[in-house]
Amino acid sequence: MSLPTTTRQWILTYKPTDLPVLSGSSPTFTLQTHSIPSLKQNQVLLKTLFLSNDPAQRGWISANIDPARLYAPPVPVGAAMYARSICEVVKSTTDSFKEGEKVLANGGWTEYRVLDGKECQKIQDIEGVDITQYLGALGFTGLTAYYGIIDIVNAGKDDAVVVSGAAGATGSMVVQIAKNMLGCKKVVGIAGGADKCRWVESIGADTCLDYKAPDFKEKLIEATDGYVEVYFDNVGGEILDLMLTRMKRHGRIAACGAVAEYNKSDGHGIKNWFEVISNRIEIKGFIVFDFLPKIKEATGELVKATKEGKIKVDSSNETVVETGFEGIPETWMKLFEGGNRGKLVTKVK
């Protein structure tokens, strides 16, 4: 079989200030075709099979963020959109990988890509576990949850924990780690919609509250009676503001995401900041890349917990959307529409 010489790519064309635009005269992304460079020694030619969809990607293309304030270089205009991916090795000039093997890589929104072999990670087969879980529960998503709830807020059996975005990729793992691995005395999830809430309860939450319900505030106050020690924040905005009033004195907050704010040029703002001062609340932001030295150890713990049945890793904790290459941006946008339960993965067809 002859090797491909060109590849389609989704290129960042205009950096958005609000919700990304997928059509019209100034689209956020455009579909282009580019030549594939020849392989050099110790490189691989990869074919994209699956793409990770993450809210953090929105920050990488924002027109409102100073690049110097980002934790990683942003996507430059004219480059293919960044994304973690599962790929198949089509051609290899390194002894580390054979043709046909599946690897994890930062492949981006491109059909084919040439990378150095050292930039790829071989995927370990686990019986009964789909490889897509390496983009979610057993990948950076699961590690983010593990790092945040264990290292950042040091949750334990004596803590009551609230998790926002609890039906999302990271939040659903936080729920399971907190309840099933750490044995926290109470875990309260927050999610959008009754079906998602029931699912969050099925994986370990003592209760899950629908933020779309008209009595959400009252239900949250009831569920956090006596206040809570730990809040894992994936959303920011109004829910974070409300949770500041539900923290115990010396409570700990893991600031993981702000999906409620990503597509707004004028954010909600915090009205209850004095709660942080008066109750000595500790808020700590973090990025999973800070945790790189411990990734092997943490991955081992997650795999062990999966085999012991403490972490549920199956089709219920991921939303895999089979998508033609032309539809990759539309599938990614489902993140901001609440169109996923657990990890949102694009299966490129």
Image: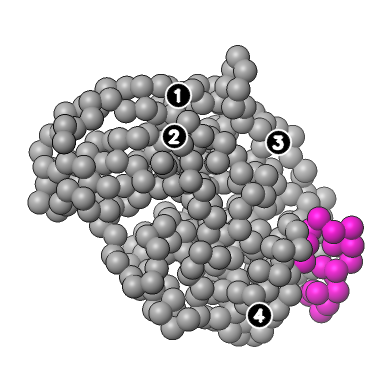
Please, what secondary structure does the residue beneath circle 1 have? strand
Q: Find the magenta span and give its range.
A: 209-227
Q: Earlier in the sequence, mark 2 or mark 1?
A: 1
Q: Which residue type carries mark 4?
A: Asp
**Is 216 contained in the magenta span?**
yes
Give the residue at mark 4. Answer: 159
Q: Residue at x 60, y 14 (%)?
A: 25
State the image coordinates of residue 293 (x, y, percent, origin top left): 34, 63
Tell whether position 276 is magenta. Answer: no
Question: In which image quadrant can residue 336 be found?
Answer: top right
Q: Along the line of sight, which residue is nearer the eye, 240 or 125?
A: 125
Q: Which label was assigned to residue 264?
A: 3
Which residue corresponds to mark 1? 31
In the rendered structure, the answer to whether residue 164 lies left or right of residue 91 reads right
Give coordinates of residue 347: x percent, y percent. Answer: 44, 47
Q: Give above or below for 195 relative to 68.
A: below
Left or right position of 5 against 31 = left
Q: Please name the residue that numbered disc 2 is placed on.
A: 325
Cα separation between marks 1 and 4: 49 Å
Instruction: Judge the density around disc 2: few (<14), some (14-19), many (≥20) Cα neighbours within 10 Å.
Output: some
Find residue 174 and report its image quarter: bottom right
